[in-house]
Amino acid sequence: MSSRIGPLPREEWDEAAREIFAYWEGEEARQNGSRSNTMMVLANHPALAKASLDLGRYFMLHSTLTARQIKLIILRAAHRYGSVYQWTHNSLGARQIGISDAEIEAIKAGPADPVWQSGDRLLLELVDATHAGGKIDDALWHQLTANFDKRQIMDLIHATGYFTSVAWTLIALDVQVEPDFADFSKSRAKGGKS
Protein backbone atom coordinates (compact mmCIF):
# COMPACT_ATOMS: atom_id res chain seq x y z
CA MET A 1 0.00 0.00 0.00
CA SER A 2 1.25 3.50 -0.71
CA SER A 3 0.41 7.01 0.38
CA ARG A 4 -2.51 8.74 -1.34
CA ILE A 5 -0.04 11.40 -2.44
CA GLY A 6 3.12 9.47 -3.11
CA PRO A 7 6.72 10.42 -2.53
CA LEU A 8 7.88 13.13 -4.90
CA PRO A 9 9.29 11.43 -8.04
CA ARG A 10 13.00 11.97 -8.62
CA GLU A 11 12.39 13.83 -11.89
CA GLU A 12 10.56 16.51 -9.85
CA TRP A 13 13.31 17.05 -7.30
CA ASP A 14 14.00 20.76 -7.60
CA GLU A 15 15.93 22.87 -5.09
CA ALA A 16 12.82 23.59 -3.00
CA ALA A 17 12.08 19.87 -2.65
CA ARG A 18 15.72 19.13 -1.81
CA GLU A 19 15.49 21.73 0.98
CA ILE A 20 12.66 19.70 2.49
CA PHE A 21 14.64 16.45 2.22
CA ALA A 22 17.58 18.11 3.97
CA TYR A 23 15.51 19.90 6.64
CA TRP A 24 16.27 17.33 9.36
CA GLU A 25 18.61 14.97 7.54
CA GLY A 26 21.25 17.21 5.96
CA GLU A 27 23.25 16.99 2.76
CA GLU A 28 22.95 13.27 2.15
CA ALA A 29 19.17 13.63 1.97
CA ARG A 30 19.49 16.70 -0.24
CA GLN A 31 21.33 14.52 -2.76
CA ASN A 32 19.57 11.17 -2.32
CA GLY A 33 16.12 12.03 -0.98
CA SER A 34 14.81 11.63 2.53
CA ARG A 35 14.58 8.27 4.27
CA SER A 36 11.28 9.51 5.77
CA ASN A 37 8.08 8.85 3.83
CA THR A 38 6.62 11.95 5.47
CA MET A 39 9.34 14.21 4.11
CA MET A 40 9.15 12.61 0.67
CA VAL A 41 5.39 13.27 0.57
CA LEU A 42 5.69 16.80 2.01
CA ALA A 43 8.21 17.64 -0.72
CA ASN A 44 5.27 17.67 -3.16
CA HIS A 45 4.36 21.07 -1.61
CA PRO A 46 7.61 22.67 -0.37
CA ALA A 47 6.13 26.02 0.73
CA LEU A 48 3.53 24.34 2.95
CA ALA A 49 6.08 21.79 4.15
CA LYS A 50 8.56 24.51 5.16
CA ALA A 51 5.95 26.48 7.10
CA SER A 52 4.78 23.36 8.93
CA LEU A 53 8.29 22.10 9.61
CA ASP A 54 9.35 25.48 10.99
CA LEU A 55 6.49 25.42 13.50
CA GLY A 56 7.38 21.85 14.43
CA ARG A 57 11.03 22.84 14.86
CA TYR A 58 9.94 25.60 17.23
CA PHE A 59 8.11 23.10 19.43
CA MET A 60 10.90 20.52 19.27
CA LEU A 61 13.83 22.86 19.88
CA HIS A 62 12.82 26.30 21.12
CA SER A 63 9.54 26.14 23.04
CA THR A 64 9.27 26.21 26.81
CA LEU A 65 8.41 22.50 26.77
CA THR A 66 10.73 19.61 27.58
CA ALA A 67 11.40 16.73 25.22
CA ARG A 68 9.31 14.53 27.51
CA GLN A 69 6.34 16.91 27.41
CA ILE A 70 6.50 17.10 23.61
CA LYS A 71 6.56 13.32 23.26
CA LEU A 72 3.61 12.91 25.64
CA ILE A 73 1.60 15.43 23.60
CA ILE A 74 2.50 13.79 20.29
CA LEU A 75 1.74 10.29 21.49
CA ARG A 76 -1.57 11.23 23.10
CA ALA A 77 -2.65 12.98 19.87
CA ALA A 78 -1.45 10.01 17.79
CA HIS A 79 -3.39 7.59 19.97
CA ARG A 80 -6.58 9.65 20.08
CA TYR A 81 -6.67 9.97 16.29
CA GLY A 82 -5.18 6.59 15.38
CA SER A 83 -2.10 7.91 13.57
CA VAL A 84 -0.06 4.72 13.23
CA TYR A 85 2.84 6.51 11.54
CA GLN A 86 3.07 9.19 14.23
CA TRP A 87 2.70 6.65 17.05
CA THR A 88 5.33 4.29 15.61
CA HIS A 89 8.02 6.92 15.12
CA ASN A 90 7.34 8.81 18.33
CA SER A 91 7.05 5.80 20.63
CA LEU A 92 10.57 4.91 19.47
CA GLY A 93 11.65 8.52 20.05
CA ALA A 94 10.03 8.48 23.50
CA ARG A 95 12.07 5.41 24.46
CA GLN A 96 15.22 7.16 23.20
CA ILE A 97 14.69 9.98 25.72
CA GLY A 98 13.88 7.71 28.64
CA ILE A 99 10.10 7.40 28.63
CA SER A 100 9.36 3.89 29.84
CA ASP A 101 7.35 1.24 28.01
CA ALA A 102 4.84 1.35 30.89
CA GLU A 103 4.39 5.11 30.39
CA ILE A 104 4.03 4.69 26.63
CA GLU A 105 1.28 2.12 27.21
CA ALA A 106 -0.32 4.39 29.84
CA ILE A 107 -0.61 7.17 27.25
CA LYS A 108 -3.33 5.06 25.64
CA ALA A 109 -5.26 4.86 28.93
CA GLY A 110 -4.89 8.60 29.44
CA PRO A 111 -4.51 10.87 32.44
CA ALA A 112 -6.37 8.57 34.87
CA ASP A 113 -3.69 5.87 34.67
CA PRO A 114 -1.90 5.62 38.04
CA VAL A 115 1.54 5.75 36.42
CA TRP A 116 1.27 9.53 35.96
CA GLN A 117 2.68 12.13 38.30
CA SER A 118 0.70 15.36 38.56
CA GLY A 119 2.54 17.38 35.87
CA ASP A 120 2.24 14.64 33.25
CA ARG A 121 -1.37 13.96 34.25
CA LEU A 122 -2.24 17.64 33.81
CA LEU A 123 -0.55 17.73 30.41
CA LEU A 124 -2.58 14.71 29.24
CA GLU A 125 -5.77 16.26 30.63
CA LEU A 126 -4.99 19.42 28.66
CA VAL A 127 -4.44 17.42 25.48
CA ASP A 128 -7.76 15.64 26.02
CA ALA A 129 -9.59 18.91 26.73
CA THR A 130 -8.10 20.49 23.63
CA HIS A 131 -9.17 17.51 21.56
CA ALA A 132 -12.66 17.74 22.99
CA GLY A 133 -13.29 21.12 21.37
CA GLY A 134 -10.74 23.26 23.14
CA LYS A 135 -12.85 23.87 26.23
CA ILE A 136 -10.72 23.91 29.37
CA ASP A 137 -12.87 23.97 32.48
CA ASP A 138 -12.04 26.23 35.42
CA ALA A 139 -10.80 23.40 37.63
CA LEU A 140 -8.26 22.22 35.03
CA TRP A 141 -7.26 25.81 34.26
CA HIS A 142 -6.61 26.45 37.95
CA GLN A 143 -4.38 23.36 38.16
CA LEU A 144 -2.53 24.34 34.99
CA THR A 145 -1.78 27.84 36.24
CA ALA A 146 -0.54 26.39 39.53
CA ASN A 147 1.94 24.14 37.68
CA PHE A 148 2.89 25.94 34.46
CA ASP A 149 3.57 29.55 33.57
CA LYS A 150 1.55 31.35 30.89
CA ARG A 151 4.12 30.71 28.13
CA GLN A 152 4.23 27.01 28.94
CA ILE A 153 0.43 26.82 28.86
CA MET A 154 0.34 28.61 25.52
CA ASP A 155 3.02 26.25 24.15
CA LEU A 156 1.12 23.22 25.48
CA ILE A 157 -2.11 24.31 23.77
CA HIS A 158 -0.45 25.26 20.48
CA ALA A 159 1.72 22.12 20.43
CA THR A 160 -1.40 20.01 20.88
CA GLY A 161 -3.00 21.71 17.90
CA TYR A 162 0.11 21.41 15.76
CA PHE A 163 0.73 17.73 16.45
CA THR A 164 -2.97 17.02 15.95
CA SER A 165 -2.78 18.60 12.48
CA VAL A 166 0.26 16.42 11.77
CA ALA A 167 -1.75 13.34 12.84
CA TRP A 168 -4.62 14.36 10.57
CA THR A 169 -2.28 14.87 7.62
CA LEU A 170 -0.54 11.52 8.09
CA ILE A 171 -3.90 9.74 8.38
CA ALA A 172 -5.61 11.54 5.49
CA LEU A 173 -2.66 11.02 3.14
CA ASP A 174 -2.19 7.44 4.40
CA VAL A 175 1.57 7.89 4.83
CA GLN A 176 3.08 4.47 5.42
CA VAL A 177 5.64 3.53 8.06
CA GLU A 178 9.01 2.77 6.50
CA PRO A 179 10.17 -0.86 6.93
CA ASP A 180 13.55 0.41 8.20
CA PHE A 181 12.20 3.32 10.30
CA ALA A 182 14.10 2.23 13.43
CA ASP A 183 17.40 2.67 11.55
CA PHE A 184 16.90 6.41 11.09
CA SER A 185 14.02 7.64 13.26
CA LYS A 186 15.19 9.56 16.30
CA SER A 187 13.93 12.05 18.80
CA ARG A 188 14.79 15.58 17.71
CA ALA A 189 13.37 17.39 20.72
CA LYS A 190 16.02 19.53 22.39
CA GLY A 191 18.75 17.03 21.65
CA GLY A 192 16.67 14.27 23.19
CA LYS A 193 16.79 15.71 26.70
CA SER A 194 13.73 15.31 28.89
Image (cartoon, rainbow, N blue to C red):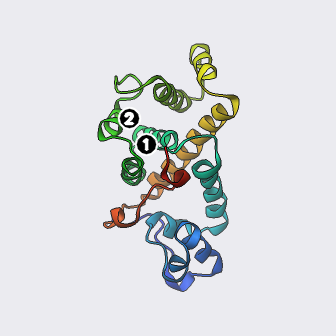
Q: Position of residue 124 (x, y in %)?
A: 47, 30
Position in image of residue 189 (x %, y %): 53, 51
10 Å neighbourhood of mark 2: few (<14), some, or many (≥20)?
many
Q: In the rendered view, tell whether residue 62 sits above or below residue 157.
A: below
Indicate the quadrant where residue 20 lies: bottom right
In this rendered view, identify the residue nearer to me: 171 or 71. 71
Q: Which residue is mark 1?
A: 75
Q: CA distance from mark 1 to mark 2?
A: 7 Å
Q: Which mark is residue 107?
A: 2
Residue with the most extreme right position: 150
Residue at left offset 35%, top offset 27% = 115
Q: Residue at x 52, y 55 (%)?
A: 191
Residue nearest the viewer, comparing 43 with 155: 155
Whether the residues at callouts 1 and 2 have beta carbons within 8 Å, the answer is yes
What is the three-letter code of the residue carrying label 1? Leu
Residue 178 at least partly seen = no
Can you say which quadrant of the picture contains the N terminus? bottom left
Q: Is residue 5 above or below residue 110?
A: below
Q: How many marks?
A: 2
Residue type highlighted by circle 2: Ile
For the residue carrying disc 1, how many other residues have a C-alpha within 10 Å: few (<14), some (14-19), or many (20+)?
A: many
Please tell me whether mark 1 sits on a helix, a strand or a loop.
helix
- Where is residue 58? Give x, y as percent: 64, 51
Residue 117 sits in quarter = top left
65 to 85, vertically: above or below:
above
Q: Is residue 118 visible?
A: yes
- Per the image, label 2 sits on a secondary structure element best described as helix
Is 146 placed above or below 98 here? above
